Amino acid sequence: MADIIHFQPKHEISAKQNLDSFIEHCKNTLTLYDDQGGWQSNNWQHKQKNRSIAMTFSKYRAKSNPANFDPLDEPFLSFAKAYIRYNQSIKAVSSVTNKMVALRMLHDALVAVHGIANVLKTDGLVIGELETITKQRVTNKDRRNKIGYQIEILLEFIRSKRTVPALQSWENPWPKVGAKAERTDEDSRKWQDTRCPSMHQMLALADCFSNAETLEDKYWSSVITLLMFAPGRAGELSELTVDCLHRGENGALGVRWYAEKGFGHTIKWVPESLEQTVIEAHSRLMEIGKPAREAAKYAYDHPNVFMRHAGCCTPDDFAENKPLNAYQFAHAMSFTEHSITSMKAKTSQFSSVTAWNMVGGKNTKWVQKLIASGEPTYEDLASFVASEYQTHDWPNLPSIQRPVWESLVLIRDREFHNDFDVREFSWRLPSVNELNAQLAIRDKLKNPPKTLFQRMDYKDEDGSDIRLTSHQIRVWLSTNAERGGMDAWQLARWAGRARINDNRHYDLRTQDEREQQARSILEFNERPTALEAIKLNLPVSYKDLGVNRIGIADVTEYGMCVHDYAMSPCTKGGECMTCKEHVCIKGMPETLERIIRLEEQVESQFNKATEDNADGVFGADRWVSHLGWKLAHIRTQRERLESEDTPEGAILWIPPEHDPSPVKRALEQNDLEINASDQDLVEESEVAMLLGIENA
């Protein structure tokens, strides 16, 4: 990891001296990207998992080309490199491309106004030109907002680091655009109609898993299955480990998951009907990835040693530092039988130039590099393997501290290639692009590989090729969860979203469905009951529960609570089932199952305390009394909820005499009134008015 030392500007020196000090600090103190040519290079890359994000310090071109560009003018080029290196050293982010765009905009604004790309000349005129350039080049409103945000950060950085201390403050004038899933314009409506996969497309995915026969189809359909039981991101699959399956205390199957974007470690629970499918997918991936895991483990356990595999043709005692001829090299590097046969037909001198040219010595760069100093050895091949397959996180997976050979989705290089043999000694993680190539044909390629659907002969309902992205699977699951009435918090947890508000980006219910939800509320001629309000995701008021007080009840694991902030803090410590302020509602989803589980747990504790009391354990008798009291209330509520005599939606309290308040006890002990007299009562409308509540 790069060394991070924060730059602190000095107030007593000039702006130019501060700028020079900042550039000097980033150039000579920070080490990020030194492995990519360092300060001398004009093209860095931010590596994130299996993809690289280019950072090219080039002038603006309508169509960029990292291989052919004009670098930014000095002295702005040095500032731009320092700015990127400094910020990426503090926190490396994939959105660095927007920072690069903001820098190019500022560069061009400086040249347009002052004729020179010098950040010290940033002023109000430059900021005005910057806004004009941004409007011209960025037409998409959502992207313009993001670029504007980076420009705001850049200008504040220039001011705060005293490069231009008198620079006016500037705020992003382009507002954040609403979620596309919520917009009503024509383009957004069209996008919404095509974004959420159809049931036919999702069932085709399920059929692919069920009917897969080849290793390639089994692998990719299994990977996709792990995105179908709960919403997940394709980039998170590489963090799944071989021991990711987990059984909860209640026997439910879960998958240990590392969610991106700040959510972190979680367990995604598998619906009971999909348990065997997920177990089968896990089993297939374990089997297919076994050789890759063995190769990665061997490379770790035997550094600088090439893994001799079944394809090698040298004897067992062949020395690691002994040169290999072209024939031995081709076998070790898993060349195809056709390539080896062609070489043998061309020459019998396997150390000749002709033989080496037949295995890539003439036009294949990696082979040319290996034979540059003569015929390579197994030691040279081991070094090649390390440079090719050991990432900067080696030996761990990108986001979790687990070795790469424990990855569930690990495969070998060229594992499913049609033209080349698999490299027996290799290992790698699949990329998101590879997964998406299995779901939709890549039209931009001259000879695109067949998708999973094409190989298994599945078509869309209109006869065309099925086209999906891995993200659309996540959208489909989230949308159908909304249709099923899953609450926002639970949906965010299920999908691994750190922010509940992000649910809206995935809710692609049709306008008719949204209107139907609104209609279902408007259909009530009178206020819905507590149970009806719960099922419609509406707040439940105290009045709905029969409490003559203004306020909204809180949801608990077992029902609703009417204790609010106007009172002293709750002293029950989670003992809701023996509290007079807690209510159970028959028909409230999942509460009965939780109460049954609670009863089993408390009964187990009660039986243990009873046994200990019989053995004369000190203090056990008090626990028998306490747990017996608690168990009696839980069991009574459970029996009332299960009883056919209890109507749906019934509100079930415990008797208030079973949970008297300390204040009531004190009043009774002193022979004082415990009920307010009529003359002390205040009209509810007066209280509502004092609280600022209209139509309470």
Image: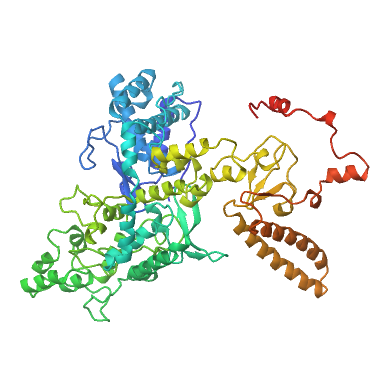
In the foreground, 482 or 421: 482
Q: Residue at x 30, y 50 (%)?
A: 468
Residue 601 coordinates in the image, percent (x, y): 67, 64
Looking at the image, residue 52 sits to the left or right of residue 92; the answer is left
Q: Is residue 558 visible?
A: yes
Query: How many discs appear?
Result: 0
The quadrant holding residue 381 is bottom left
Residue 359 coordinates in the image, percent (x, y): 14, 66
In the foreground, 151 or 42: 151
Q: Measured along the vertical axis of the image, is residue 667 above or below residue 363?
A: above
Q: Residue furthest top?
A: 125
Q: Measured along the vertical axis of the image, is residue 77 above or below residue 577?
A: above
In the foreground, 302 or 18: 302
Looking at the image, residue 274 sits to the left or right of residue 213; the answer is right
In the foreground, 655 or 158: 655
Q: Is residue 429 visible?
A: no
Residue 619 coordinates in the image, percent (x, y): 82, 66
Q: Residue at x 33, y 49 (%)?
A: 198
Looking at the image, residue 685 sits to the left or right of residue 303; the answer is right
Image quadrant in which the C terminus is located = top right
Residue 199 coordinates in the image, percent (x, y): 34, 52
